[in-house]
Amino acid sequence: MKVVERYILRRAFAVFIAALSWTLAIVWTTQVLGRIDLVTDSGQSALTFFEVAALILPTVIPIVVPFALIIAVAQTLSSMNTDSELVVINAAGASRLTIVRPILILAIGASLFSFVIDNVADPMARQRNRELIATSRADLLSLIIQEGTFRKVDEGLFVQVGERLPNGGLGGIFVADSREPNIDLVYYAKDGSFIERDGKQMLVMNEGVIHRKAPGGEVSVISFDSYAFDLSEFSAAANEVVMRPKDRSTLYLLNPPPNDKYYQRNPLQFRAEIDRRFTEWLYPIAFALIALAVAGDARSHREARIHPLITTTAIALFFRWLGFFADSKGGSLPWVSYVVYAVPLFASALAIWFIATNRTMELPVAAADWLAAKFARARDWMTALRIRFGGGGAPRQGAA
C-alpha cells in the first residue's frame, strides 16, 4: 500500500471510530431508556439492567456502522478537497484508485464486522436477553412480597403488599386487574398469604372487598372473608422462553425443524430474517461507494452547491429507507426478498458507474437549490436569534 493510501486510510479510520462511537452512544441510549421498566416493574438489580443494556449493542451496531462509515468517508474526502490535497494527488499523476482503494479496504472491514455481529453476536445476545426477561418474571413471589412497592405481574395486573407479617403472612394487600377490556377490578384485603394448592400458586386474601367497574360506569362493591387469586398461569408463562426468528442462529434459520411452532405459523418470517442478515452487511460497501462518487474527486469550491456530507447522507438515507421498507414487507410478501437484495446492489452499481465514468453524484438541481435555500434560511434565523438574545445589537458596518 502506498504512503498516500495509508494516509487516507488512517484519516478515514480515525473519523469512522469517532463517528461510530458518538452515533452508537446516542442510539444505544435511546434504546436503553426503553428497558428501564425491567428494573422498575420487575424489581431486578442494577446489574441485570446493565447486562440487558449491554446486550442491546449487537442489535444497534449493524444499523449504525453504515452511517458512521459514510460520515467518515465523506468528511475525510471533503476535508482533503478543502485542503487541496485531492488536487495535489491528481496533479502528481496518481490514478483515482489511489483514493478508492483505502476507502474500499475500510468499507470491506466494516462490512465483515457487521456480518459477524449480525450472524453471530446478535442472535446470541437476543437469546440471552430473552432468558433474562423470562427469569425476571419467573421469580414472581419474591417480587410481589417486597413491601410498599407496586409490582407489574402482567399487562394490566399490578400487586402491592403493604408489609410482611411476623408469621410469614402478608398485610395490606392491593391488586388492580384491568386485563379484561372495559372492566376494572380492584381488590383490597387486610391480610393474606401465598399457598400452593393442587400444584398451583395462589394468593389467598382475607377480610377484603372487590370494587368492580362495569362498562357503563357502575361500580359494585363485594365484601369477602376469603378470596383466592390464581397466580400459577403467570409463573408458567414466565418460565417459557419464546424464541422469534431474530433470536435464532443463522444455521437454525437455514434449516429450521419442522416441529417449530413459530415456523409453522410464520415460515416467511424465517426467510425474511435470513434475507436481512445476508444483505445488511452490504450497506457499508454501498455507502462507501456513494461517498466516493459524491466527494471522491477534486473540485472547485464554487462548483459545490451544498456540502458533500449532506448530499451523501441524503442519498444514503433514501436507499436505506428502501431497504428498511423491503425488510418490513418480507415477512408477508415472498417476492419482496428480491427487492431486499436489489437495493444495496443497485446502490453499489449506480455509485460504481459514477466513479468509472468520472462523474460526480449529486442531488438534482432543484433539490440542491431547495436544500441550499433551507440551510441559508436556517443560518440567517440562527444569526438573528444570536444577535437578539446575545445583547450585541446589530452588527457594525465597516469594522476593521
Image (cartoon, grey):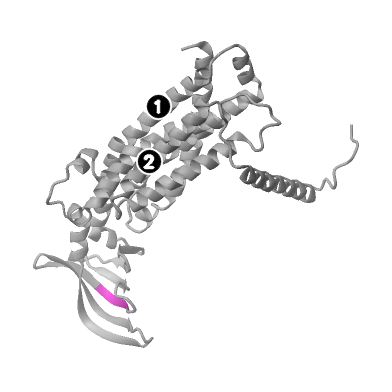
* Res 76 quadrant in image: top right
Residue 108: give its label: 1
Report the amino acid beneath label 1. Answer: Ile
Relative side of 138 to 64, left or right: left
Which circle marks residue 237 in the picture?
A: none
Mark 2 is surrounded, within 10 Å at the Cα level, by few (under 14), some (14 to 19) or many (20 or more) other residues, namely some
**Which range of residues does the magenta coloring cover?**
184-191
Q: Position of residue 334 (x, y in %)?
A: 28, 51
Residue type at mark 2: give it.
Answer: Ala
Instruction: Find the residue positioned furthest to the front.
Output: 357
Q: Quadrant of residue 285?
A: top left
Q: Residue 342 has which mark?
A: 2
Q: Give the image location of residue 241, x and y in percent.
A: 21, 52
Q: Residue at x 44, y 33 (%)?
A: 349
Q: Nearer the viewer, mark 2 or mark 1?
A: 2
Precedes in sequence: disc 2 or disc 1: 1
Q: Position of residue 68 (x, y in %)?
A: 48, 35
Q: Is residue 160 visible?
A: no
Residue 183, placed above or below residue 167: below
In-image side of 211 versus 23 (left or right):
left
What residue lies at 25% left-to-right and 53% top-to-bottom? 134
> Which residue is located at x 53 percent, y 16 percent?
95
Q: In screen coordinates, is 111 left or right of 359?
A: left
Q: Label 2's element?
A: helix
